[in-house]
Image: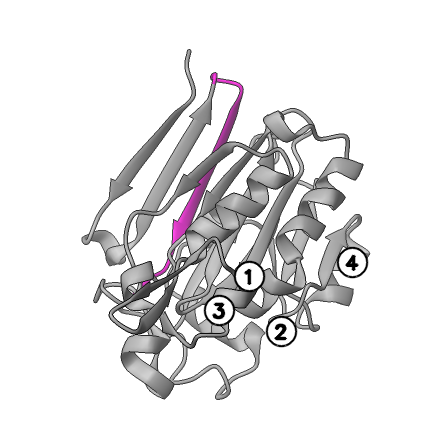
Amino acid sequence: MTDKLEYNVSRDESHRIHTLFEAKSLYRLKFALGIPELNCALSIRSKPPQKLLEHTLAEIKPSALPSRIILLKQIHSRIIHKISNRDDIERFNGIEGDALITDLPDVGLCVSVADCAPIILADKVNKAIALIHAGWRGIEAGIVEHCTEILFHYGAKPREIFAYIGPTIGKKDYEVDSKFLELFPDSTQKINDKFFFDIPTEIKRRLAMSGIVNVYIFPYSTKDSMWLHSYRRDGIRAGRNLIVIWKNRTGSCL
């Protein structure tokens, strides 16, 4: 069976977006992206990260979720936390950082985004998973490369890692200043004296430099999609899209 990527985008049933990709029937990763009618915050400053998660997940059946979910205090850094045992769950929940990695089952990794990119990395052989919050500052700091290096320490090989770049702002919606031409020359374009940064293209380029070529990209811009939250569109009142991934108890990923 060839690798495949399926989109099943539904604006019904709580406006959840379900995405499934399957690699040669050996590995499955399924995750829910955002619940727009549950505005998880008037602003990211109004509640601590864990309260955002609790508020947004309140109406989801507990049986549909892992028993524990970890959400960091995101600071646009290259800080990554590796969840190696159950004690790490309490230790890392709510602390500063922008990526999580684990090979433990039934432990949900979560990030919140409103234009930045969530990046899912999954090793189909060793079953390690990673979730990254990647804005331009984190990308510049090298969080993508740093995270792949840690996955390699699990024994993962580049061509065994599948990457998914989730809902983020599209290039045509992300006007930036001229310094981005120096920071990201391969992913910044000048159009009519304006500059536009392409986050997915830059992430894909950096993943390719690490040897990861199985990369899939969510096809909609957060700013251009009213059913997704966007800080560029809604400003301080913007909600957040939550991304949760986990391995189920059988060892596959959900």
Disc 1 to disc 4, C-alpha distance: 19 Å
Going 47% across and 43% down the picture, which residue do you hit? 164
Q: Left or right? Give the position of 122 relative to 18.
A: right
Q: Check disc 3 and report the residue beneath it.
A: 180
Disc 1 to disc 2, C-alpha distance: 11 Å
Of labels 1 and 2, the one closer to you: 1
* Mark with earlier residue (2, 4): 2
Disc 2 to disc 4, C-alpha distance: 15 Å
Q: Which residues are magenta?
A: 24-36
Q: Check disc 4 and report the residue beneath it.
A: 88
Task: Please name the amino acid that badge 1 sits on.
Answer: His
* Mark with earlier residue (1, 2): 2
Q: Check disc 1 and report the residue beneath it.
A: 133
Of labels 4 and 3, the one closer to you: 3
Asked if residue 226 shows in the view, the reply is yes
Q: Secondary structure at mark 2?
A: loop
Along the viewing direction, whichever of 77 and 17 lies nearer the viewer: 77
Q: Check disc 2 and report the residue beneath it.
A: 73
Tell me if residue 167 comes above or below residue 127 in the rendering: below
